[in-house]
């Protein structure tokens, strides 16, 4: 049966610019080959709820109507990717608003915006707040490897999409019991990620109740300083991901 909106699929992909430059991939080997490998990134197949916007619009739309096993590519124009380049999103900002003295090429956060420093002139910086891929045509080469059919599998996939964590799931009628890893609540933005996952579960699946279980054993609980270090490490990784 052809894939439709609301279906959950497992895919692999590689994204390129028109000149062949690889900018993103789910394949660790390809990432290393083209010099874009990151230790903070989770490589491997990814799950997508078709039509939910987990991938850019042009890629999302191309999944519809395909069959499991499909291998191909789609060319995504800027308007269905990261938008057209907008000159109005280039601002001049006082460097007093930045945490550190900027230099050309730095990625910086100003309020809730992230941009690239184009020039520094005296006490002011010219910052481009367009997405780095704005105005770019993208090419996605991808394979559809699975359409998730069972309810527990769909819940696992949704949690992976929105939290990046593997969970154990048991289904009892219209109730799902989800056991999360013991570090789950130390994850940056864990409450928001959890709510995002729950919202999609109730939107797409025939589930009336979700019980989230966090199980700990005495010998597994790390010392407080170890927890703090892990939390700081995850926050740094999240900041890097936001700036990429």
Image (cartoon, helix red, strand yellow):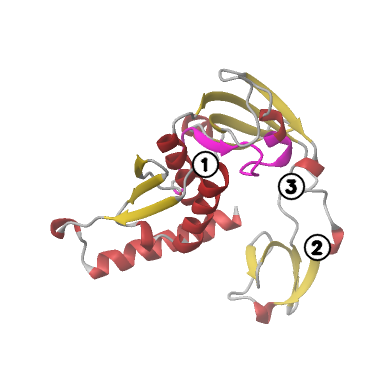
Residue lying at the far bottom of the rendered structure: 96
**Label 3–label 2 contact, CB within 8 A:** no
Please give the label number shown on residue 205: 1
Q: Residue 214's spot in the image, x, y percent?
A: 29, 56
| Res. 38 visible in picture | no
Residue positioned 63% across, 26% down in the render: 3
Q: Residue at x 36, y 55 (%)?
A: 212
Which residue in the structure is indicated by mark 2? 89
Give the class, few, some or many, for how many residues have Cα within 10 Å of label 2's Cα (few <14, many ≥20): few
Q: Which mark is residue 82?
A: 3
What's the CA distance linking mark 3 and mark 1? 29 Å
The quadrant holding residue 4 is top right
| Mark number displayed over residue 75 | none
Q: Helix, strand, or loop for circle 2?
A: helix
- Nearer to us: label 1 or label 2: 1
Quarter of the image where the N terminus is located: top right
- Dot 1 and dot 2 residues touching (CB under 8 Å): no
The residue segment tinted magenta is 40-60
Q: Is residue 21 magenta?
A: no
Q: Quadrant of residue 48?
A: top right
* Secondary structure mainly formed by the magenta segment: loop
């Amino acid at each position: 049966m052809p894939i439709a909106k609301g279906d959950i699929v497992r895919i692999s992909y590689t994204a390129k610019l028109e000149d062949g430059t690889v900018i993103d991939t789910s394949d660790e080997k390809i990432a290393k080959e083209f010099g874009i490998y990151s230790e903070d990134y989770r490589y491997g197949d990814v799950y997508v709820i078709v039509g939910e916007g987990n991938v850019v619009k042009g890629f999302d739309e191309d999944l519809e109507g395909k069959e499991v096993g499909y291998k191909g590519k789609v060319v995504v124009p800027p308007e269905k990717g990261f938008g057209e380049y907008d000159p109005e999103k280039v601002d001049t900002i006082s460097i007093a608003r930045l945490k550190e003295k900027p230099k050309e090429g730095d990625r910086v956060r100003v309020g809730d915006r992230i941009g690239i420093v184009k020039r520094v002139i005296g006490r002011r910086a010219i910052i481009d707040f367009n997405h780095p891929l704005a105005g770019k045509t993208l090419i996605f080469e991808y394979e559809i490897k699975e359409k998730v059919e069972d309810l527990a599998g769909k819940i696992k996939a949704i949690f992976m999409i929105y939290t990046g964590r593997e969970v154990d799931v048991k289904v009892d009628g219209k109730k799902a019991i989800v056991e999360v890893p013991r570090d789950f609540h130390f994850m940056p933005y864990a409450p928001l990620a959890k709510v995002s996952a729950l919202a999609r579960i109730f939107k797409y699946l025939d589930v009336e109740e979700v019980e989230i279980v966090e199980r700990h054993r005495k010998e597994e609980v790390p010392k407080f300083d170890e927890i703090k270090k892990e939390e700081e490490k995850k926050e740094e990784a999240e900041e890097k991901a936001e700036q990429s």
